[in-house]
Amino acid sequence: MSTKISCSSAQLDDAAGMAAFLEPIPNGAELGKLLQKREPLSSRAYDDDAWTARFVVSDGHGVTCFTVMDITIDQAEMIAAACEGRPALPEAEFTAVVAESLGPTAELAD
């Protein structure tokens, strides 16, 4: 099984972009309410059934969601710990953090 990473972003003042951003996220409406405060935010969630973790980061102007598929909850926790204290990461840096967190046996899909 290989780990897949996807990334989506939106500007908080773009209603259509935010609707599209929040639609695939479980509990997206609740996340949207938090993002409306336009304050920096860092959140994560894990879906046991889908083996999928979501890491959401906002600077109060824009928001990014990194979705990491085919990982265990323990792996999700290792990624979260590695991201702790880091500002919003570009996709390439987040991917590097995932690879580093999962170790030498990580298979990252393109």
Image (tube, rainbow, N blue to C red):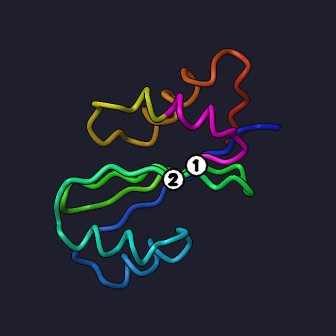
Closer to the camera in the image, 108 or 84: 84
Q: Quarter-wise, where is residue 11 in the image?
A: bottom left
Residue in the picture at 45% in, 50% down? 44
Residue at disc 2, secondary structure: strand
Q: Tell me if residue 13 comes above or below residue 40 in the rendering.
A: below
Q: Measure the alpha-carbon separation of dots 2 and 1.
A: 6 Å
Residue 3: say if magenta: no
Q: Residues within 10 Å of mark 1 (few under 14, many from 20)?
A: many
Which contiguous range is marked in magenta? Answer: 67-79
Q: Quarter-wise, where is residue 85 in the image?
A: top left
Q: Provide the residue designation for mark 2.
A: 45
Going by the numbered disc 2, the residue's amino acid type is: Ala
Report x, y in % for residue 45.
51, 53
Residue at disc 1, secondary structure: strand
Q: Residues within 10 Å of mark 2 (few under 14, many from 20)?
A: some
Report x, y in % for residue 105.
73, 19
> Which mark is drawn over residue 53?
1
Report x, y in % for residue 35.
27, 68
Q: Quarter-wise, where is residue 64 in the image?
A: bottom left
89 with respect to 60 (left or right): right
Report x, y in % for residue 71.
69, 40
The C terminus lies in which quarter of the figure?
Answer: top right
- Callout 2–callout 1 Cβ contact below 8 Å: yes
Residue in the picture at 38% in, 51% down? 43
